[in-house]
Image: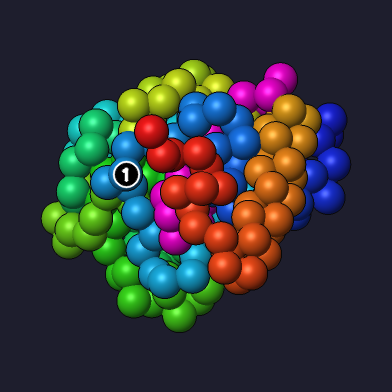
Amino acid sequence: MAADIAQGTYEALRNLGVATVYEGSGGTGALDAAIKPVWPGAKVCGPAFTVRCPPGDNLAIHRCLEFVSPGDVLVIQNGGLSGGYWGGILTVGAQVKGVAGLVLDGGLRDSEEIGHLGFPAFARGTGVFRTLKHDQGDLQTPLVVGGVLVNPGDVILGDSDGVMCIPRARVDAALEGGSKREAAERAIVERIRKGELTMDIYGFRR
């Protein structure tokens, strides 16, 4: 886990959630909405450990588990293909190493098992198609995943609303902006409960 970011920061961002942090960050960093949680209620926040796989080959994913640190979030680029790049065995291997979760720009399998294991996984979908194990791939290199540049150590935040990437240099600002957004929304909810309309609160009338 990135040593320059406090564990409490990851927890605070996870508690705020993707939608709030995204808005508090000026509407930046959201990955393609097609990358969704594999099971309901999955949440993750941690530093990105990036993996690039060639199409149809997942050897790099197996290899990365030798080098990950507890709390890392695996961010895997494989060209958006729907094969079974990840499954139950890799999930157990990742949990043993303390990996916090997975963001896969492609498909996985054993989704029900992954849900039972409680491992936060986000992917484009599921697919049973087998993969090869020939190419070493690339570890800890900048990747474009879901249309967003992800550098090793950037903060990955995911929940039911989707996944976003926060550059390391922007983490404090994202937390501050998200916290302010949450406080502002609480105040708006109280005004609504007292009878005000969103048309008036937001000044939408012309």
| Quadrant in which residue 43 is drawn | bottom right
Span highlighted in magenta in the image: 158-170
For mark 1, what is the residue?
Answer: 33
Task: Say which residue appears at 81% left-offset and 35% top-offset.
Answer: 5
Q: Judging from the image, what secondary structure is the residue with disc 1 in?
A: loop
Q: Residue 145 sits in which quadrant?
A: top left
Where is residue 57 shown, x and y percent of the image?
26, 39
| Residue appearing at x 35%, y 54% in the figure | 36
Instruction: Report the residue at 77% width, 30% height from top.
Output: 172
x 51%, y 48%: residue: 200
Return the x and y of residue 58 as percentages of the image width and height: 32, 42
Instruction: Point out the residue furthest to the front here.
Output: 206
Left or right, 133 with respect to 21, comes to left
Q: In which quarter of the image is the C terminus?
A: top left
**Tally of numbered discs:** 1
Q: Which of 59 and 199 is in front in this view?
A: 199
Give the left or right position of residue 118, taking residue 124 as reference: right
Q: Which residue lies furthest to the left in this view?
A: 129
Rendered location of residue 52, percent (x, y): 39, 29
Q: Residues within 10 Å of mark 1 (few under 14, many from 20)?
A: few
Task: Give the colour scheme shown.
Answer: rainbow
Q: Does the magenta run of residues contain 157?
A: no
> Which quarter shows the N terminus?
top right
The disc labelled 1 sits on which kind of residue?
Ala
Above or below, 86 relative to 1 = below
| x then y, percent, for residue 46 | 65, 45
Q: Nearer the viewer, residue 198 or 178?
A: 198
